[in-house]
Amino acid sequence: MPPRSTASFISYDLRPAKQSERRILLDLLKIAGDCGLPITDYRYVGMGANRFYDFLLIHKYLGIAKMVSLEHDPVMFKRAVFNCPYSFIDVQDKTAADFISADPFTVPSILWLDYDGGISPRIVHDIASLSTKLKAGDFCFVTVFGGPPRALDRENDQARLAWFQDQLGDVAADVSLADVERASFPDAVHKVLIAAFRNAFSVRRDGQFIPFLQVEYADSLPMITVGGGFLADGQAVSFRRRIKGALPFLSTEDTKLYEIRSLHLTERERALFDRATTRPTKRSSERNQLKKLGFKEAEIAAYKDLIRYLPRYVETIV
Amino acid sequence: MTEKLKADASPEKRLFISLITRDIPLVAAFLDLIDNSINAAVEPASHRLLTAEDYLKLFQDEAVKPTVDIFLSVSPEQVEIRDTALGISAKTAAEHVFKFGRASNEAHAEDRLSVYGIGLKRAMFKLGNRIAIHSDHINGGFDLKLNVAEWAKETKQPWTFDITPCQPAKDNATGTKIIVKELYDDSKRRLSDGIFLGQLKEAIGKTYAFYLSKFVNIYVNNEKIVGVNIEIGSNHASDEFTVGDVSCAITVGIGTPQGGSFRDRSSGWFVFCNGRTVISADKSPLTGWGGAGLPIFQPKHRPFLGTVFFVSTDAEKLPWTTTKAGINEDSAIWQEAKRHMTAVGRVVVNFLDGRYTDEGTEVASADLQDAAGPRVSVMSAAVAQKRLFDPPKRPPPQNMKIQYEVKVADVKRIEEYLGRPGMGGAEVGRHTFNYFLRNEVGEK
């Protein structure tokens, strides 16, 4: 039986870190456009659930009008069809694995496989299958729960490591006992996803997979996203250069996980952060004021990274 | 008189390089490089490693700590291995180190992991085109810079590498550094395939568990590698024999569960030559499974753990292949070992087979650990007194099944008589049995 969709029991209305992640992804795809890729003509394949937030953003900001939403949960499928915001979104009652195996990938594609559960062999297999389908210039992102899968929740560290090694094989060969402790579990998931992408695309000679999005965030539960572009060598050089300029906190060379911090700020605090982090120097009255309010240097640095991506929520009465 | 001509039978370098590098996996090539460093690290203590007992004594000697560091730095651009062992003198480099294979009269009694005189060259040739070696030795080390493609084009005989002698090392700052650049395409792809580094670290931890605890610290991209020590239940069987210069100790028992279960990767046969793991968790005909001796390995055999520990001061007599990642199946010592392995292993296999009968599993998983006894290291087990596995006595069965054939119509009649249509044959049987027991035999 397929796992139950989280959309049936989690409210996605207010997830600031997730929204920041979506906006970062949009920026990355805009950079792809700046590098000469015809992003508007791309197809977006996602898992829109019943809110379709990523679909709305991608259509509005990138102009993409070919979209597929995958929904394997039979109950949620009906609701997804009902809530589908645009007629050009093709909601398909399929798992990612079924879609990847059936689709010819003749259209340049951006895939965001936003899985409901934790890391599993199924996800590693999906990445491996994708590597045989994606063309140079395609993009793929995978999001998974960063904590232990349900089966491992009550197990000790030794049993968790054994599960990684037995279930995930070589892509988990670099996972250590320290990685599978509860506090560092996202690191284990990150290592597996990076290894899965690298290994899957290592045999391709027509390009290289650059995992330029490696982030973790936690609106409620820890989540990990790893993904990037399968790019021809020339594209890769220019892409890396532009990302370094526009999103310097993301790593295009190393395997480094960036934490999208959840900053819970009032409007007045936010205005102060805006001014403090856009000053050319570190010494400013705004920064001093933030410190007096108890904010740490790491929070100011995080705000500086994410200033363009943090959402603002307001309540409206309708 | 017929004139005799000399037919050219000289080797082509290009073919030679291809032959020696083709059959070695990249991980094994790295292990070859590490073997050289460990061999150098062990050299000063080689007189303490003559027999299997010596290995155990050293393993158990808490005063012995690693004295040599080996640093591996691996990237798709270059590979570097650096050690702080005694280094290689210019004389040794000129006369021995770069010779392909050992001369018949060339013996190094202190060698434990250096066997055929091919590993270092093969590993370097496998990786890339530009090789640089620098070694510091108290009697003067050497420098070597080699462009393999250029060298392969030269046809002069005999084959040589140009080396430059260096000044004697000062303040005991000895050691050897090898850098390989211009990596070949296959190596580059493998090194960046996302899983290679993990496989390499795992292989180092498994292969050198003994040496990691006593002789060397190994770091891969600055991460210290921890040896994977195997433990076995103290209720185990063991056997030993010696053929010529080679001694062999065999131990078979029940392994230790990890995370609550016996794992595939920790079961089967493990074979060690001079303390180095050669094969791990083997369940193939190579070690007797599915052959004449032992049954085909099945999941019920996962608690099985067998170790074979070969020791010799003449490493060439050990039954390992030139890559040290496999066994030379035809070697007489291996054939002899296999017979002993089968004989000792059968007792444990029979016990594990006996856990499953028509009545179901008779020994629960937790009871297996009781049967195994307290854990001991396989090293201790390998050199302990010869002993037998003592399978736990099974209590006599408390229940049994009764099966017999009757007419369906008669069963229906009983069902109707009891007023319970559809109660089925098993229930009818139980009812009639209980009726007879109560009314004819009488309750206890």
Image: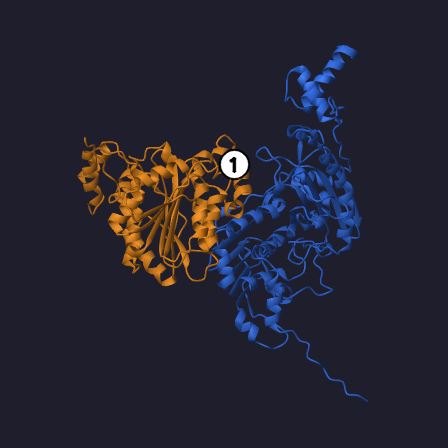
Q: Amino acid at mark 1?
A: Arg
Question: Quarter of the image holding residue A9?
Answer: top left
Which residue reaches farthest right? Answer: B1
Question: Quarter of the image holding residue B138?
Answer: bottom right
Report the residue at 52% width, 36% height from top. A160
**Does residue A93 appear in this view?**
yes
Residue A85, horizontal then vertical, whole percent: 28, 43
Compared with B33, B145 (above or below) is: below
Q: Quick check: B423 left or right of A19? A: right
Report the residue at 75% width, 34% height from top. B389
Return the chain for callout 1. Answer: A
**Does residue B64 appear in this view?**
no
Which residue in the structure is indicated by mark 1? A160
Q: How many marks?
A: 1
Q: B17 or A3: nearer the eye?
A: A3
- Write down which chain is painted orange: A
Report the residue at 73% width, 65% height from top. B104
Q: Quick check: B8 left or right of A47? A: right
Question: In which quadrant is the C terminus of chain A drawn?
Answer: top left
Under circle 1, the secondary element is helix
Q: B301 or B210: nearer the eye?
A: B301
Q: Quick check: B82 left or right of B395? A: left
Q: How is the image coloured?
A: by chain
How crowded pointer 1 is (Cα within 10 Å; few <14, some 14-19, many 20+) is rated as many
Residue B413, horizontal then vertical, whole percent: 70, 20
Which residue reaches farthest bottom? Answer: B1
Residue A70, horizontal then vertical, whole percent: 38, 44
Residue A228, horizontal then vertical, whole percent: 37, 51
Chain B, chosen colour in render = blue
Compared with A97, B439 (above or below) is: above
Q: Quick check: B195 left or right of A114? A: right
